[in-house]
């Protein structure tokens, strides 16, 4: 099957400290994978490096998007090729209204001018899916938003930009169950043979609504285990310690 | 440069134009001050970041003289055409060099009492009005230290300028404007006098533009704003000179009781610009809001000095200056809030924020308070920060190019200043001009 996203032996450092230590992961087109792991494992770093964050240094390895090596590309070039990262901590950008920002982003994504009607049609659809009031569009990007509103706004951007590969970094954290359902509905509306997603989460809860095809577990900068949806249930029940031991044994033998 | 090169003869300027005696005397007095006081040096506090640049200003260029040119409306330079088509001026003057080349002042406004003409025309037509106000906000004979060097030179040898007078009670809503283009290879010395009578109201925009010049020019300009009791003035000075222009500007506003000034200083052009903008709150209840926007790229050096001089009690002043620098640009802000002993119940605020778009860009920010009254509210704040790389990454991660992302962030940074200008057309024009400075093709 076509691999829409493929990470090969990725080593990444920040300020001289190695954070990712040989990540391998492949995400075929049309699938949704979950990425789990304890705090500090490197999940967000992986997401940001895939998106092209230049705060990190790629020491070794490659990121392939639809078979193309994108490791050296600017973040915006990756986005125009269909990549999307929903941030764990979306930035506040006072002075930039959501509407202006999204219109510019959509123009870049489609590589052409976007008529106002087409733009608003996409927006309205997204707002409706997320049960969100239009009033939000005039607000500055994430400024003064609650944690939940910020997450919802990430999904609104996802729905308007319609990427091919989305990485959702803890989009569920800070959401109550109703908001979680709304956000999951948004993501599920994107699911299909032309869309794949890597869903980073700590909680099984989200995976009840966005059911993954595959679950990866990351620890200390590596993917240490890959399995089916049942792996998430097992982690929920048993925590990570048993896996740590398993990894230690495997490393020792 | 040597003082020798600066042997002007202010008498000749007066005689050649058959100016009134009081003006001839004032010029002479100013010239004495000019000869007596030293040039600003690094030791001159207000000039500490620009004394070196000042040394390199070629003051020994020939004085820009009127040549008696005048244009039809169709023959006006393209930039003027484009500005007047979008600026919605109810009246405007166009200067090329020292010549007033075109004037459009509807009779209806003149009948209401608006006087809007060149300063030399005004000296002939309304001599008492000019005499009563000229040199009142920026005296010809200053007390005499290095800071008075340039004002004295201007007072002595200015030879072109603008006069605006709005009589008591006349309230004009639509802005009036002056558009001026400098010539290459000259020392241009101009003066603007704006007088508002009691409860008069006016919006006045000055725009300065030139292409990049092959030979350097110096623009030494002073603007006096005199606001009668209850008068209300919106004033903008927009400097968009090309490369090779040295721009030296001082503005002083005198605010009587309950007068209100909303001022905007914009420095986008010139190789070296120095703007000193001050308000004297002379009457209780006066209110001076002073906004500033500046953006240096290439090797531009843009220096700003503001003065909030509170003389009367119960007055308010608020300085809000924001600067951007990219490439090797240099931006400087110094400001002083000065409260006299009588200035009780003053509200005075001063904020300066700077955004740097490159590693080589430099900014200085020095707010200062000098307070001789005790029952007052004063605050100041300043910051210098590079563009937020996380914000930029966030925007880029949505497909927006690095340049466009920086553009959005610069526009966002300046948004609140632009939003406070009461001149919508101007705000829109400036937003576009700033976009071009960031580097996005528009
Ligand atoms: N920008 C950064 N500056 C300093 N340290 C960083 C930075 N980014 C990541 N790290 C470090 O790298 C390690 C991995 O961090 P990362 O945020 O990727 O973990 P995570 O798996 O997303 O954790 P969480 O589940 O808590 O979100 C941590 O030790 C973290 O402190
Ligand atoms: Mg994380």
Image: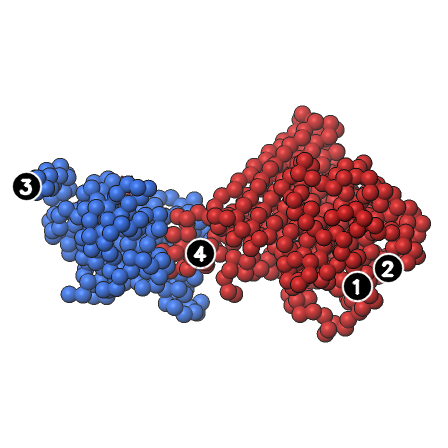
Q: Is mark 2 in CB contact (under 8 Å) with mark 3?
A: no
Q: Residue at x 56, y 54 (%)?
A: B297
Residue under label 2? B121
Q: Label 2: state its secondary structure.
A: helix
- Going from N to C along the chain, the mark reached first, 1 or 4, is 1
- Letter of the chain that mark 2 sits on in the rendering: B
Residue to which mark 3 is pinned = A253
**Which residue has dot 1 on it?**
B100
**Tag shown at residue B405:** 4
Q: How many marks?
A: 4
Q: Quarter-wise, where is residue B380 in the image?
A: top right
- Looking at this view, is B347 or B69 the one in front? B69
Residue A30 location (% of width, % of height): 20, 63
Mark closer to the observer (2, 3): 3
Using the image as rendered, state which of residue B276 and residue B218 is in the foreground: B218
Q: Chain of mark 3?
A: A
Left or right? Give the position of B111 relative to A234. Answer: right
Check if mark 1's residue and mark 2's residue have beta carbons within 8 Å. Answer: yes
Chain in blue on the image:
A
Toward the bottom, the furthest residue is B74
Q: CA distance from mark 1 to mark 3?
A: 91 Å
| Label 1 Cα crowd, 10 Å radius (few <14 / some 14-19 / many 20+) | many
């Amino acid at each position: 099957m076509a691999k829409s996203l493929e990470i090969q032996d990725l080593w990444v450092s920040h300020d001289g400290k190695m954070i990712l230590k040989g990540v391998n992961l492949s995400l075929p087109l049309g699938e949704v994978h979950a990425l789990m792991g304890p705090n500090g494992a490197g999940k967000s770093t992986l997401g940001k490096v895939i998106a092209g964050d230049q705060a990190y240094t790629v020491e070794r390895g490659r990121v392939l998007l639809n078979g193309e090596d994108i490791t050296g590309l600017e973040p915006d070039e990756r986005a125009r090729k269909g990549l999307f990262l929903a941030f764990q901590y979306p930035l506040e950008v006072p002075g930039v209204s959501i509407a202006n920002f999204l219109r510019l982003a959509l123009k870049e994504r489609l590589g052409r001018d976007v008529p106002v009607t087409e733009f608003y049609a996409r927006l309205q659809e997204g707002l409706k899916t997320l049960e969100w009031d239009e009033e939000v569009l005039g607000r500055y990007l994430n400024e003064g938003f609650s944690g939940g509103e910020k997450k919802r706004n990430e999904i609104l951007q996802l729905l308007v930009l319609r990427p091919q590969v989305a990485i959702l970094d803890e989009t569920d954290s800070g959401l109550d169950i109703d908001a979680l359902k709304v956000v999951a509905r948004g993501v599920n509306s994107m699911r299909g043979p032309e869309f794949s997603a890597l869903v980073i989460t700590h909680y099984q809860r989200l995976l009840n609504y966005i059911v993954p095809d595959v679950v990866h577990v990351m620890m200390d900068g590596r993917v240490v285990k890959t399995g089916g949806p049942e792996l998430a249930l097992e982690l929920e029940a048993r925590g990570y310690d048993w896996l740590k031991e398993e990894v230690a044994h495997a490393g020792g033998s | 440069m040597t003082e020798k090169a600066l042997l002007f003869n202010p008498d000749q300027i007066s005689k050649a134009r058959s100016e009134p005696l009081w003006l001839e005397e004032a010029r002479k007095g100013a010239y004495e001050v000019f000869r007596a006081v030293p040039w600003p040096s690094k030791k001159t506090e207000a000039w500490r970041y620009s004394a070196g640049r000042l040394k390199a200003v070629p003051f020994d260029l020939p004085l820009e003289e009127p040549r008696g040119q005048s244009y039809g409306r169709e023959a006006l330079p393209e930039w003027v055409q484009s500005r007047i088509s979008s600026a919605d001026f109810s009246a405007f003057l166009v200067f090329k060099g020292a010549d007033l080349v075109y004037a459009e002042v509807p009779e209806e406004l003149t009948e209401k009492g608006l006087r809007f003409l060149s300063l030399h025309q005004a000296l002939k037509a309304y001599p008492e009005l000019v005499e009563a106000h000229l040199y009142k906000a920026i005296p010809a004979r200053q007390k005499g230290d290095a800071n008075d060097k340039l004002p004295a030179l201007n007072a002595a040898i200015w030879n072109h300028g603008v006069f605006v007078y709005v009589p008591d009670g006349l309230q004009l809503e639509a802005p009036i404007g002056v558009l001026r283009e400098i010539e290459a290879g000259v020392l241009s010395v101009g003066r603007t006098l704006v007088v508002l009578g009691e409860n008069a109201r006016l919006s006045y925009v000055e725009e300065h533009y030139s292409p990049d010049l092959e030979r350097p020019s110096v623009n030494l300009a002073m603007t006096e704003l005199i606001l009668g009791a209850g008068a209300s003035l919106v004033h903008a000075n927009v400097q968009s000179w090309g490369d090779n222009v040295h721009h030296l500007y001082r503005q002083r506003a005198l605010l009587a009781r309950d007068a209100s000034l909303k001022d905007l200083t914009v420095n986008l052009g010139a190789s070296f610009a120095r703007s000193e903008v001050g308000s004297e709150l002379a009457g209780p209840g006066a209110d001076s809001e002073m906004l500033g926007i500046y953006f240096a790229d290439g090797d531009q050096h843009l220096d700003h000095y503001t003065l909030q001089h509170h003389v009367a009690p119960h007055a308010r002043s608020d300085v809000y200056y924001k600067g951007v620098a990219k490439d090797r640009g240099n931006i400087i802000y110094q400001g002083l809030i000065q409260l006299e002993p009588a200035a009780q119940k003053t509200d005075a605020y001063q904020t300066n924020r700077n955004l740097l778009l490159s590693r080589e860009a430099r900014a200085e920010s020095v707010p200062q308070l000098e307070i001789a009254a005790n029952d007052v509210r004063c605050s100041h704040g300043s910051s210098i920060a590079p563009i937020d790389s996380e914000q930029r990454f966030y925007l880029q991660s949505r497909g927006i190019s690095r340049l466009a992302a920086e553009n959005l962030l610069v526009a966002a940074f300046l948004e609140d200043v632009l939003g406070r200008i009461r001149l919508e057309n101007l705000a829109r024009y400036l937003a576009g001009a700033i976009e071009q400075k960031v580097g996005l093709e528009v």
